[in-house]
Amino acid sequence: MAEESTSPCEARVEAEERVLLLAPTRRDAAAAAGVFRAAGLPLTVCEDLDGLCGEIGRGAAVAVVPAEAVLQDHEGRLAAILKDQPPWSDLPLIVLTSPNQTPAAALALEQVGHMTLVNRPIEVRSLVSTVRAALRDRRRQYARRADFVERERQAQALRENDRHKDEFLAMLAHELRNPLAAVNNAVAVMKRSGDPASRDWAGAVVERQVRQLVRLIDDLLDVARINGGKVRLKPERVDASAILDQAVETIRPLIDERRQILSVAVERGRLPLEVDATRIGQVVLNLLANASKYGEPGGRIWLAARREEGRAVIRVRDDGHGIPPEKLPEMFQLFAQGDRSLARSEGGLGIGLTLVKRLAEMHGGDVEAHSDGPGTGSEFVVRLPLAAEADGRPEADAAADRALPPRPARVLVVDDNPDSASGMVQILELLGHQVASAHDGPAAVASARSFRPDVVLLDIGLPGMDGYQVASALRRDEALRGVVLIAVTGYGQEQDRRRSRAAGFDHHLVKPVDFDSLAPLIGRPH
């Protein structure tokens, strides 16, 4: 019959319950062994101080030693072991001493550490009672150990979080300063140069860098909303090809700037999805942006989408930097990046892939990262469930609506920032609209009643009356019942959108406004 093996955990527990004895003589050791075993105490007899120190390292509940062994430990081995215990541990040390111990010897013993002195000649029952009391104290220490280890583990999470936070804040400052520096330089060129080509270049730089800042802020807010469970999807039936086309159109300027070649292979009309198209577009756009940023200038990017096993599978591949194997498992963790050094030039906060993963999972899908290592490129694969077959009417209606030609409209722009209001007025006038403006709440109400606009672009944070109060006042006016109210604001949280709907707004846009999104809202028949 095979012997039962002892698990490492069981072996550790047995070792930690032991009573270690370094007896003055072999005769004392033999006598003590009989007494301890009769009392049911697990005794381990040590031959010398080196042996005792070694056994303490393996685990022990109590150590019993003669005073002369401690006093003759000129190298301080026992004192060093007792000092080196973890914070939760205070090994009970019982020292067998003589009643005529000199004061100098007693002082030397105190320097070693916490101990209980037992006079010789030893009364057996007294020694057993002292050992049992020490065992109870040691077991209380073991009970506290689990709490201490858990507190240490939590403290290490907090320290790690603090480290990530500090790295993130440093990277955030870096990522904000870069586009701001580019905008600052472009503005300086526009102010000092009369050359139309230079001014056109500067305007393109400002537009490009503003888009970068908007994307950065949107990603930050999206991470906060998703982590707080505040993102609500707005599913619609759409073919994946439409989402991919929009993402490609958006990313094209970056790819062209880096002289990269993008190859697209999509099974059109065969990938029906029931998704929030904006959010899935965000997934694809993040992956394409990463492929461009972490690819070499002049490199290649592949975007493919096809049916596989009842799901739509979207693949984004590049021939760029690649990912070290040890980094693959953490690529989707918040703030994780392949290279955290401030010297890297690609940019990014390490939150894009977190958004990709969370948004894919919110749609019942998943995402994977693949790479054969540095210099081999990388591939990201998104899998989404296909929608059930439908008659296609919602898509046809939406397409027809998008195809409606714009028409001139009377637009009231309300913003307390004169530069922002003036810029919006000029753009709308260039688009052929008739525009008026106001810079505070009461003036907005008065202008609306005299100007009779078709559309009001209304900021929320206004002096006198805020945007919600202005909207409520306009909705109460019979003459303005048909006006379209569009919130144009820096407040973009879900609760802000709910509040604007409750106040009577028809649409909610976040600054800076995407004019491609705004134009149809103004020019569409109402």
Image (cartoon, rainbow, N blue to C red):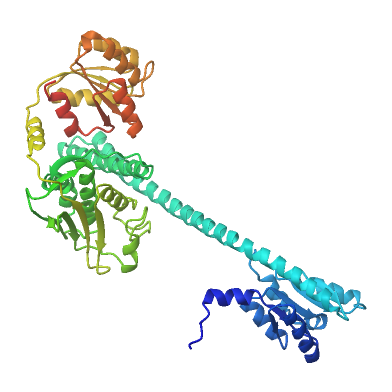
Q: Nearer the viewer, residue 110 or 341?
A: 110
Q: Is residue 46 above or below residue 266?
A: below
Give the x, y percent position of residue 382. Answer: 21, 55
Image vertical order of residue 2 relative to residue 343, above or below = below
Residue 217 is situated, as x and y percent measured from the top left of the image, at 32, 41
The residue at the far front in this view is 1
**Location of residue 56 in the rendering, given as x and y in whole percent from the top left corner:** 66, 78
Q: Residue 24: x and y, percent?
A: 80, 86
| Left or right: 248 as drawn, with respect to 282 | left
Q: Is residue 280 above or below residue 495?
A: below
Tell me: 82 left or right of 189.
right
Q: Look at 17% across and 27% down and name the residue there.
A: 521
Can residue 108 be seen in this snapshot?
no
Identify the residue at the far bottom of this view: 26
Please give the name of the residue rendered at 26% of the width and 30% of the height, measured from the top-left corner: 509
Can see residue 376? yes
| Quadrant where the C terminus is found in the figure | top left
Which residue is depicted at the point 22% across and 64% down?
A: 377
Q: Is residue 458 above or below residue 254?
A: above
Q: Is residue 285 left or right of residue 73?
A: left
Of 89 and 1, the residue lying toward us: 1
